[in-house]
């Protein structure tokens, strides 16, 4: 009898941790189509379910009903790739700090709550369908100058080139940017300055990247402007919502790199 009582307690506790809520999801058939919100009710979702797993459950229910599933982007589901670009309750990636949507769990929400889910809102990120957007603009900025031009060869010794710990740490912190686009979605101007500054900083701080620093800064900023991203007005919303905590000071470094490059022309 003791094992049975233990099983009943576990089942009861599990049910107590389940929540029911409404989803208000943006539906849009294509980039040129007019979008709208649709409401869905979710019952008894365990709080240890991730947000994307919850959307998987919703899509299973929609498919069983013969309805069109909700399209959303995802890949690694480990907070590495930056694909899960969802705007949840007015925040890019949701209410969690320093986490992507795939690292968001339903314990962050309350029973009876209405959860609003939207795609990134930016002219440079057109909606493909529903919650999926085209972030190819970031790839084009990266292709414009986010690299170093030399033969890679074999991996050198770690101490072959003397680099201060502070510079190495700052470069590594900048390199943690996953290019998810949360900075653009959070910015009222739709600026990509935090993304561009992180990519410029990770090279500008290291001797390998200093050789092409001027060309890189001018090329990446020019491509950013060409693709329709807005101007930075230092509101700081990008850094506040960044899942990888990229620092706002990177934007100041980008401005310095860009101005120095322009002056030297």
Image (tube, grey):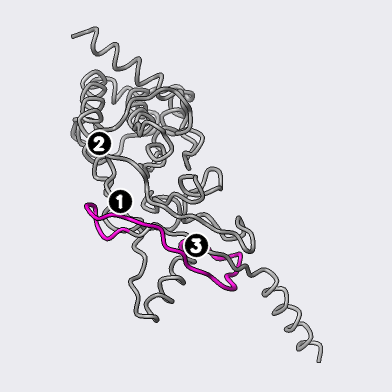
Name which quarter of the figure residue 220 lies in. top left
Residue 152 on the magenta span: no
Q: Camera-side residue: 245 or 56?
A: 56
Residue with the mark numbered 2: 142
Q: Quadrant of the C terminus?
A: top left
Q: Secondary structure at mark 1?
A: strand
Report the side of 226 relative to 209 (left or right): left
Count residues near mark 2 (Cα–Cα under 10 Å), then give few for <14, some for 14-19, many for 20+: many
Report the side of 46 relative to 41 (left or right): right
Q: Secondary structure at mark 2?
A: helix
The location of residue 252, given as percent across then percent down, is 41, 19
- Of mark 3 and mark 2, the one earlier in the sequence is 3
Q: Which mark identifies residue 23?
A: 3
Viewer-nearest of labels 3 and 1? 3
Q: CA distance from mark 3 to mark 2?
A: 35 Å
Residue with the mark numbered 1: 133
């Amino acid at each position: 009898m003791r094992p049975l009582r233990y099983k009943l307690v576990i089942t009861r506790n599990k049910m107590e941790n389940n929540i029911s809520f409404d989803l208000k999801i943006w539906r849009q058939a294509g980039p040129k189509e007019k979008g709208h919100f649709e409401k869905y009710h979710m019952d008894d979702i365990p709080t240890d379910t991730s947000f994307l797993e919850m959307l998987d459950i919703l899509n299973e229910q929609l498919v069983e009903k013969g309805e069109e599933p909700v399209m959303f982007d995802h890949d690694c589901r480990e907070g590495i790739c930056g694909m899960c670009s969802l705007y949840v309750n007015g925040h890019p990636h949701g209410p969690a700090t320093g986490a992507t949507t795939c690292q968001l769990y339903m314990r962050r929400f309350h029973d009876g709550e209405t959860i609003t889910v939207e795609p990134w809102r930016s002219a440079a990120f057109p909606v493909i369908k529903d919650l999926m957007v085209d972030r190819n603009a970031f790839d084009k900025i990266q292709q414009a100058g986010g690299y170093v031009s030399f033969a890679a060869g074999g991996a050198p010794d770690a101490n072959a080139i003397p680099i201060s710990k502070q510079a190495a740490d700052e470069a590594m912190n900048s390199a943690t940017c996953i290019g998810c686009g949360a900075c653009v979605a959070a910015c009222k101007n739709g600026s990509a300055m935090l993304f561009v500054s992180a990519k410029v900083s990770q090279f500008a701080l290291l001797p390998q990247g200093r050789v092409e620093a001027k060309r890189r800064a001018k090329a990446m900023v020019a491509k950013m402007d060409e693709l329709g991203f807005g101007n930075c007005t230092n509101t700081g919303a990008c850094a506040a919502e960044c899942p990888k905590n990229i620092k706002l000071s990177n934007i100041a470094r980008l401005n310095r790199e860009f101005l120095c490059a322009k002056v030297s022309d």
